[in-house]
Amino acid sequence: MTIEQVHANEVRVKIFKALADETRLQIIKKLYETGKELACGEACPEDLSSKSNASYHFRTLREAGLIKVRKEAQNRLVTLQKETFEQYLPGFLDTL
Amino acid sequence: MTIEQVHANEVRVKIFKALADETRLQIIKKLYETGKELACGEACPEDLSSKSNASYHFRTLREAGLIKVRKEAQNRLVTLQKETFEQYLPGFLDTL
DNA sequence: TTTTTAGTTCAATTGTTATTTAACTATTAA
DNA sequence: TTAATAGTTAAATAACAATTGAACTAAAAA
C-alpha cells in the first residue's frame, strides 16, 4: 500500500465513524432533504439531550469533512459538503 | 419517520460501524480486488495480531451483511455480499 | 445594561468496541 | 491415533466514543 492509500483509508475510517450514529445520520438526512443551509438547532433531531451533545455531533461531522459550518450572527449555519460524499460515497445520499 | 425508515437507519449504523475500521476496510478491499472467494486467513492483513481477533472482524462484517461465509473442509470461505453494498452504498466499492 | 438565544469547551462519567489469552471444535496429514 | 491446520467462543482488559453538567463566548433583544 502506498502512503496515499493509507491516507485515503484513514479518511474513510473517519467518515464511516461519523456516519455510524443515528443522530448524525438524521442530521445528514435532514440537510440533504431540505437542500439548504440550516442552523444547528434546526438540523438536529428534536429529542437531542443537550446543546453540548449536539455540538459534539456537529463537530464529529465537520471533522470528517461531511458538513461545512459558517457563523452568522448568533447562529452557526450548516450545509452538506457534497464533494466528500461524491468522492468517498457516491450515490449514498440518494439512498436516504 | 416510519418503522421501515427506523429499521433502515439501524442497518446503516451497523454497516458504517463495520466499515469504520482499518482492518475491515482492508479485508473488503482485498475481497473486491481479487473478486473471488478467499479463506479467512487469505483475506485478512498479514499483520493481524491473532486468529481470534481476525475471527471477530469477520463476524462483525458478516453481521452487518457485508460478507457471506461458507464452510468448506477446514476453511471458512468468504465473499463480498454485493447486494448490501448496492442497496446501501452504491458506487462505494469502485472508490476503493 | 441585563437577559435571552445559540452555541462552544472542558472534565468527568458512562457505555461500547477492540484486543488478548486460553480453551475449544472440526478437518486433514503423519 | 496423534499432531497440525484453520478457525470459533468466552471472559477479561484496554482503548475509545458518547453523554452529562458546569462554566464560558458572542450577538441580539428587552
Image: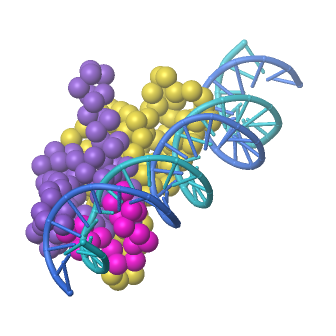
Chain colours: A purple, B yellow, C cyan, D blue
Residue drawn where x is 21% and y is 41% of the image:
B95
Q: Is residue B34 magenta?
A: no
On-image quarter of the N terminus of chain B: bottom left
**In this picture, is B61 found above or below A95?**
above
Left or right of B36, for residue C30: right
Which residue is depicted at the point 23% across and 26% down?
A: A4
- Examine the rendering and report whether any part of residue B90 can be seen: no
Give how far across and how far down residue B89 sits, in percent: 27, 55
- The magenta region covers A39-56
Q: Nearer the viewer, residue A93 or C5?
A: C5
**Residue drawn at (31%, 35%) of the image:** A9
Residue A95: which quarter of the image? bottom left
Task: Return the residue nearer the eye: B58 or C3.
Answer: C3
Q: Where residue A22 sits: x, y (%)?
A: 39, 65
Tally of numbered tags: 0
| Residue A88 drawn at (x, y percent) | 21, 45
Pick the front one: B69 or C9: C9
> Percent position (x, y) of residue D19?
49, 64
Query: Residue at point 35% right, 42% down?
Result: A13
Q: Does C26 sit above or below residue A77?
A: above
Position of D14 with respect to A1 (left or right) is right
Q: Is residue B81 left or right of residue A68?
A: right
Q: Is residue A27 visible?
A: yes
